[in-house]
Image: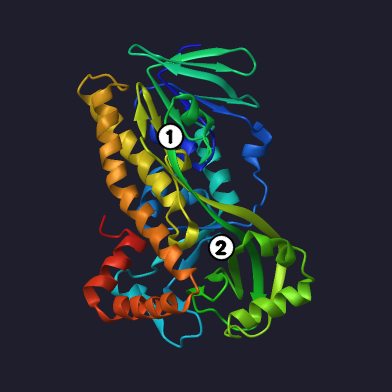
């Protein structure tokens, strides 16, 4: 089989890229290990994705946003960052930057479902499911992928979006910086007695981090980050004890809290590829950069990266140039790394500081939080990064 672009991975980033190519006249083949049935009806995985204004705009342009049920889009109107037992909070309010919200929360499985529904309507995209890419190779003339069912596909460009542990990235000889935090993220939903008023809280408690993110009604998405050695205790805890624990750790701000559904664990490993491109090959999504969730930039960077690559491809087509050229790929790499590298390094530094409970670091933690809130330019820069309104 011959096509213009091969995309490995039908997650949200890979499928968004396939959707972004619509109208270019290019033909794409998407290779995915899961079945079409799973892609069409993704299982609930407990994750609620925080989206910036830039991501909302991209999803609207792709037709994905309108496929999300309105009642499943939750507005983050304010955000508060708390540290340990300090009564002080770094506070962000949407009214200074936007009419409606700082950002938006949408269940991950609904994003996956919506983008799949968009892609299956496209005549120029072929989706091959229940196969893996056994071998990938490229040369100056083309990219070649051999699938687990024996098929061989050739193309002008190969794009990998196959997770932060990308096998395609390794096969192409691209190394990555990985940071294993030795921690687990446990996500779930909880109902509560009081109204959250659209306020998202990030609580850097001593020993663990608790995020409480506002959903529709009196319900919140709960994100607990704690050492891996303690995760089984929390996952297996009696629901009533779990409720009391979260309620207490959140300072009883929302009154009685009750677990809704299951608790889902995710090991916490951050990844940044040392290169985003090779000969006729590009990385997007988590295969390029997989972030710690504390700054909520994971899928936002995935959307942004595929959009950057698509823009370069469209420009090349308009000028009659090769869509897999090294100059095109280098422009994509420079632009995307300029965004991702500072965020990756800054996020990891923030996590290290606010998960270190030694006495000196506790003092520094308080000072940094107060410094950020007291200086308007610093606070404004943080808000711009969180919302991506000015980008």
Instruction: Tell whether label 2 touches label 1 (CB within 8 Å).
Output: no
Where residue 312 sits: x, y (%)? 27, 32
Furthest toward the right, the residue is: 238
Front of the two marks 1 and 2: 1
Provide the secondary structure element on which disc 1 rests. loop
Res. 41 visible in picture:
yes
Residue 334 position (above or below residue 300) = above
Q: Is residue 311 depicted above or below 304 in this figure?
A: above
Q: Quadrant of residue 132?
A: top right
Q: Is residue 172 shown left or right of residue 152?
A: left
Task: Estimate the x, y position of residue 226 in percent, counting from the top left.
Answer: 60, 65
Quadrant in the picture for the C terminus: bottom left
Q: Which residue is mark 1?
A: 175
Q: Nearer the viewer, residue 121 or 78?
A: 78
Which percent across, then down, holds residue 143?
A: 42, 16
The quarter holding residue 371 reads bottom left
Please, is residue 333 above or below residue 69 in the view? above
Mark 2 sits on what residue? Answer: 71
- Residue at x-position 36% and y-position 73%: 94
State the CA–CA distance, disc 1 to disc 2.
42 Å
Q: Crowding at label 1, few (<14), some or many (≥20) Cα neighbours within 10 Å?
A: some
Closer to us: 249 or 212: 249
Q: Residue at x 68, y 78 (%)?
A: 245
Q: Residue 353: horizontal and vertical position, in percent?
A: 42, 68
User: Helix or strand or loop: what does disc 2 sit on?
Assistant: helix
The one of 316 and 174 positioned closer to us in this rendering: 174
Give the farthest residue toward the bottom: 87
Identified at 49% across, 19% down, the residue is 136
State left or right for residue 57 relative to residue 359. left
Task: Tell me which numbered mark, 1 or 2, is placed earlier along the sequence.
Answer: 2
Residue in view at x 40 percent, y 76 percent? 365
Sort mark 2 into few (<14), some (14-19) or many (20+) by Cα contacts within 10 Å.
few
């Amino acid at each position: 089989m011959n096509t213009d672009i091969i995309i490995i991975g039908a997650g949200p980033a890979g499928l968004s890229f396939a959707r972004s190519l619509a109208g270019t006249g290019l033909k794409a083949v998407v290779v995915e290990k899961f079945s079409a049935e799973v892609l069409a009806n993704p299982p609930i995985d407990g994750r609620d994705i925080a989206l910036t204004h830039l991501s909302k705009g991209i999803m609207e342009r792709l037709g994905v946003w309108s496929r999300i049920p309105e009642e499943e889009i939750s507005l983050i109107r304010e955000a508060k960052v708390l540290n340990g037992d300090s009564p002080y909070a770094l506070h962000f309010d949407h009214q200074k930057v936007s009419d409606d919200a700082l950002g938006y929360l949408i269940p991950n499985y609904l994003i996956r479902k919506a983008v799949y529904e968009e892609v299956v309507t496209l005549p120029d995209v072929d989706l091959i499911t229940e196969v893996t890419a056994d071998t990938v190779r490229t040369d100056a003339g083309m990219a070649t992928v051999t699938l687990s069912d024996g098929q061989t596909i050739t193309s002008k460009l190969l794009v990998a979006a196959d997770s932060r542990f990308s096998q395609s990235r390794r096969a192409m000889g691209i190394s990555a910086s990985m940071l294993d935090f030795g921690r687990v993220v446990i996500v779930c939903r909880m109902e509560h007695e009081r109204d959250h008023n659209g306020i998202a809280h990030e609580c850097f408690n001593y020993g663990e981090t608790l995020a409480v993110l506002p959903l529709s009604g009196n319900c919140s998405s709960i994100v607990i980050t704690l050492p891996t050695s303690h995760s089984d205790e929390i996952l297996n805890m009696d629901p009533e004890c779990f409720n009391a624990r979260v309620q207490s750790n959140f300072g009883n701000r929302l009154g009685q809290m009750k677990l809704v559904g299951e608790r889902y664990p995710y090991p916490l490993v951050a990844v940044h590829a040392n290169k985003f491109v090779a000969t006729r090959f590009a990385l997007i999504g988590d295969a390029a950069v997989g972030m710690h969730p504390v700054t909520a930039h994971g899928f936002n960077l995935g959307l942004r990266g595929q959009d950057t690559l698509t823009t370069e491809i469209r420009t090349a087509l308009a000028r009659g140039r090769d869509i897999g050229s090294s100059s095109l790929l280098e422009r994509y790499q420079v632009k995307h790394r300029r965004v991702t590298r500072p965020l990756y390094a800054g996020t990891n530094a923030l996590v290290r500081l606010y998960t270190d409970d030694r006495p000196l670091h506790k003092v520094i933690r308080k000072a940094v939080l107060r410094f950020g809130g007291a200086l308007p330019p610093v606070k404004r820069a943080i808000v711009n990064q969180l919302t991506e309104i000015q980008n």
